């Protein structure tokens, strides 16, 4: 299968998957179906007029019309999640430029208005939002909710939502503009925050649990992190709020963090926190940096004159009083909030889902993936050396740099080739495909395993898979194998390590998220194996053996990590 046909199949298969995802989306933004039709038409036109370039045409249109605006939409969602409205406006404008459907241009205008709130004032912002208000569109309902939020009229927002949810059938007579507020993600988030602001904790927790599946079904980045913030902050679980800031809400501005801290401190409940279990997930260098920072602050505090100290160390009364004063000014009740047993159980379920997401979720790393970045740079440097010496497809160059040649290893004892061959690549496509897989999988495995264990998995899988290929030649199972190059075995080893960690999560922690993600990993491995078998140019032995070695090493040396609590009782 040549590259042109491979790209064509990738584009068509991706279009079908994306169409199924859009169809399952509760909001079902129909503009995406028009874009999918454009991609299919481009691929068909390429097959008719330029068959030798049809794959490149279809794949290019797919990248431009689907992948790029989807990434922009994801980034806009992340910016909103972190209350960075200027960033949301910028990313929404990019999405609108490439996808001028589904109200994206108007969304960009809305977030620009909200981003200017601190400069023009709340009253002027509300006035500028007024022309965009309307029940018949997503942006219209968003503008209405924003108006109530900016004015602090959370009871009014609940009353408005109660009316439009109760009478949504009569308001949704136009099928093109349904007013189903329970399918509108933005409305759901405002609704949950309104419950917390009006001290309806039991109802808030119940609705967080009920609406979680609808948030996770969205085509953009799931916004369940905000629901966890609502549940933890309004229930008074301050340590869980801090843990959320240190994991899923890393980019939340300092002002927003302080506001949510005051909310959590003002709710005096008996909720316990998962923060202590999660601290073991941080890498050693970050723990050392935290310890150094705390020591430095302690020394600086004691070095100041006594009159400059705001309070004695450990004087929690002054801190508590300042938090109560700040929250009272904001209108937050500081009285103790009793929690019903049923609500307590629901909070435990939310906490467990949060712990599973931190431990087994497919998301960006909490810190810079150092070893993965080094491996990608080294592979790039070696590839540049191949080009400088005569080309990445030149057999003599590859042999000189250390390609795995079975005869050279078996007869001449050049064992060093087992390691050197993992950093060589045969052409640009070979390099880019391996580095893309390493970028996606490596940072996840490095976060889960830690730097040293991750290095062991990478090297053992790369060298071990090359060694097994040489053994197949020595045993007479491979006759026509001349040489092998590439980091595919190491990348597949990382893939196998992820599968091992998810399997342990299923067995040890009974984590439902680990079970779902393990099924995804298994399906991807099955597709990769089928592709390897159908393409004789690909070393299927390297891929399968690399995955098996990575699985075994991770299973043996993986850290115990975090055991999820079954109950607080």
Image: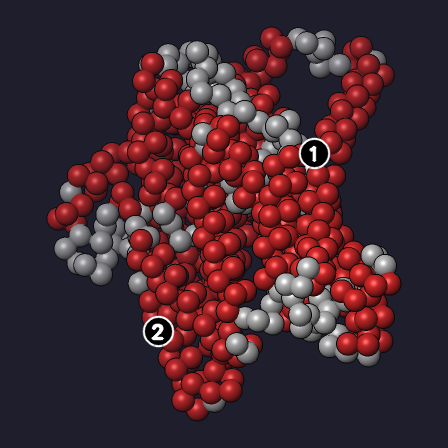
Dot label at residue 55: none
- Report the front residue among 158 and 285: 285
> What is the x, y in percent for residue 450?
69, 37
Q: Dot 2, how many residues are within 10 Å of its Cα: few (below 14), some (14-19), or many (20+)? A: few
Q: Image point 22% across, 54% down: which residue? A: 178
Left/right of residue 103 with respect to residue 443 in the rendered view? left
Callout 2: helix, strand or loop?
helix
How far across and how far down the image is residue 79, in percent? 52, 48
- The quadrant of the image that shows the C terminus is top left
Q: Quick one: label 1 or label 2, which is nearer the N terminus?
A: 2
The residue located at (54%, 70%) in the rendering is 535
Q: Quadrant of residue 449?
A: top right
In the image, 315 versus 420, the foreground residue is 420
* Residue at x 50%, y 69% (from the top left corner): 534
Label placed on residue 283: 1
Q: Is residue 32 visible?
A: no
Rendering coords of residue 273 (x, y %): 52, 20
Q: Nearer the viewer, residue 431 or 142?
A: 431
Residue 452 lies, with reference to residue 93, above or below; the image says above
- Residue 37's tag is 2
Crowding around mark 1 (Cα neighbors within 10 Å: few <14, some 14 to 19, many 20+) is some
Q: Is residue 377 above or below residue 285?
A: below
């Amino acid at each position: 299968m040549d590259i042109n046909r491979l790209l064509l199949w990738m584009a068509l298969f991706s279009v079908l998957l994306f169409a199924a995802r859009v169809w399952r989306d509760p909001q079902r933004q129909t503009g995406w179906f028009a874009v999918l039709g454009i991609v299919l038409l481009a691929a068909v036109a390429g097959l008719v007029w330029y068959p030798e370039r049809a794959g490149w045409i279809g794949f290019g249109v797919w990248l431009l019309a689907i992948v790029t605006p989807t990434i922009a939409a994801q980034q806009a969602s992340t910016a909103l999640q972190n209350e960075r409205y200027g960033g949301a406006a910028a990313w929404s404008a990019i999405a609108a430029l490439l996808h001028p459907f589904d109200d994206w241009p108007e969304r960009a205008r809305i977030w620009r208005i909200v981003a200017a709130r601190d400069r023009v004032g709340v009253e002027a912002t509300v006035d500028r939002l007024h022309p965009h208000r309307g029940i018949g569109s997503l942006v219209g309902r968003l503008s209405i909710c924003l108006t109530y939020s900016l004015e602090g009229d959370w009871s009014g927002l609940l009353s408005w939502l109660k009316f439009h949810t109760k009478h949504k059938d009569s308001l949704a007579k136009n099928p093109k503009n349904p007013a189903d507020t329970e399918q509108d993600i933005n409305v759901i988030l405002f609704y949950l925050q309104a419950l917390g602001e009006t001290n309806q904790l039991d109802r808030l927790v119940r609705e967080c649990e009920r609406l979680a599946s609808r948030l996770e079904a969205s085509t953009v980045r799931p916004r369940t992190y905000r629901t966890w913030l609502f549940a933890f902050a309004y229930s008074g679980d301050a340590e869980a709020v801090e843990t959320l800031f240190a994991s899923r809400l890393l980019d939340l501005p300092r002002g927003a963090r302080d506001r949510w801290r005051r909310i959590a401190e003002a709710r005096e409940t008996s909720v316990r926190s998962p923060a202590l279990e999660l601290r073991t997930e941080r890498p050693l260098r970050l723990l050392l940096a935290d310890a150094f920072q705390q020591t430095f602050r302690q020394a600086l505090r004691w070095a100041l004159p006594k009159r400059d100290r705001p309070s004695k160390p450990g004087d929690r009364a002054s801190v508590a009083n300042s938090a109560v004063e700040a929250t009272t000014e904001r209108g937050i009740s500081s009285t103790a909030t009793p929690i019903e047993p049923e609500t307590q159980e629901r909070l435990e379920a939310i906490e467990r889902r949060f712990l599973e997401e931190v431990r087994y979720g497919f998301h960006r790393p909490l810190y810079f993936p150092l070893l993965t970045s080094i491996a990608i740079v080294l592979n790039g440097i070696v590839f540049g050396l191949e080009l400088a010496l005569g080309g990445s497809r030149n057999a003599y160059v590859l042999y000189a740099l250390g390609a795995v040649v079975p005869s050279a290893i078996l007869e001449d004892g050049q064992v060093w080739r087992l390691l050197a061959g993992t950093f060589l690549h045969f052409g640009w496509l070979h390099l880019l495909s391996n580095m893309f897989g390493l970028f996606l999988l490596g940072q996840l495995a490095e976060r889960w395993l830690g730097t040293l264990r991750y290095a062991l998995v990478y090297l053992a899988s790369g060298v071990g898979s090359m060694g097994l290929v040489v053994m197949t030649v020595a045993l007479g199972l491979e006759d026509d194998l001349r040489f092998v190059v590439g980091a595919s075995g190491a990348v597949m080893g990382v893939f196998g390590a992820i599968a091992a960690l998810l399997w342990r999560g299923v067995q040890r922690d009974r984590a439902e998220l680990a079970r779902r993600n393990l099924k995804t990993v298994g399906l991807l491995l099955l597709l990769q194996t089928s592709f390897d078998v159908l393409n004789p140019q690909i070393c299927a032995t390297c891929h399968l053996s690399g995955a098996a070695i990575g699985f075994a090493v991770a299973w043996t040396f993986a850290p115990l990590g975090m055991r999820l609590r079954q109950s607080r009782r």
